[in-house]
Image (spheres, grey):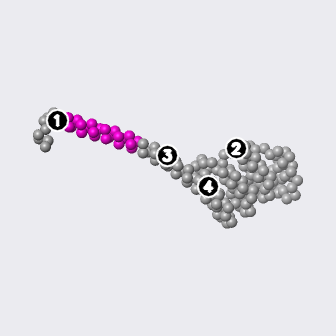
Amino acid sequence: PLKRWTFKQKRVLGIAASLLLLLTSFVLGRWTKQVPSDLSASAQNLEVEVAELKLLTASILLEQSSASQRLQGLEMLASFTETDQEIPYELLFKVLNEDQNPNVRLASTAVLKQIKHSAETKQLLVRAFLQQESPMLQIELLRLMESLNIQLEQKSLEEMIKKEQLDETIFQLIMEKI
């Protein structure tokens, strides 16, 4: 059938095919540029969901009766600091103040060292220090507060000195601060 067409008709058909190919390439090019932005939005949503699941898993692990599971929960919370995600510091202070295992409480201080501290978290650190009875935890909290330039009030230090069960090392450290 192309043999019957004139040279002019074949030329118009070639131009039309070229325009159709050009238009198709343009549309496909625009469509493929939009796909990555949709994918990046999906990836961000997926990251948020994964972080929420990690947080949920960590909080469930922190509620377990096994100390090793609670330590795994603290490790999961520590991974939040590596990705610059906000750590729920309330969970950390709950572990620090209420956990029956001193090793788990000590591990929570290691995670506390990694987070960004606001004025509120600094106040919670001071309260946690005043509540602790374990010399090991008191020393770690004193070091952490010192690294954050947190000053204990004179009144609080004097109350600590009056405690009968105050460890000698802690007593000396407090006396240096007074």
User: In the rendered structure, which amino acid carries the disc numbered 3?
Assistant: Ala
**Secondary structure of the residue carrying numbered label 1:** helix
Q: Nearer the viewer, mark 4 or mark 1?
A: 1
Q: Give the mark, 4 or 1, whose residue is nearer the N terminus.
A: 1
Q: Residue at x 58, y 52 (%)?
A: 51
Residue nearest the observer in this picture, 109 or 54: 54
Residue nearest the observer in this picture, 88 or 30: 30
Q: Quadrant of residue 69?
A: bottom right
Q: Residue at x 80, y 52 (%)?
A: 130
Q: Quadrant of the C terminus?
A: top right
- Give the CA distance from mark 4 to mark 2: 20 Å
User: In the rendered structure, which amino acid carries the disc numbered 2?
Assistant: Ser
Q: Are marks 2 and 1 in contact (CB under 8 Å)?
A: no
Q: Residues within 10 Å of mark 2 (few under 14, many from 20)?
A: few
- Give the CA distance from mark 2 to mark 1: 77 Å
Q: Which residue is mark 2?
A: 118
- Prevailing secondary structure of the magenta residues: helix
User: Residue 71 appears at what percent x and percent y?
Assistant: 65, 61
User: In the rendered structure, which amino acid carries the disc numbered 1?
Assistant: Gln
Q: Which residue is mark 1?
A: 9
**Secondary structure of the residue carrying numbered label 4:** helix
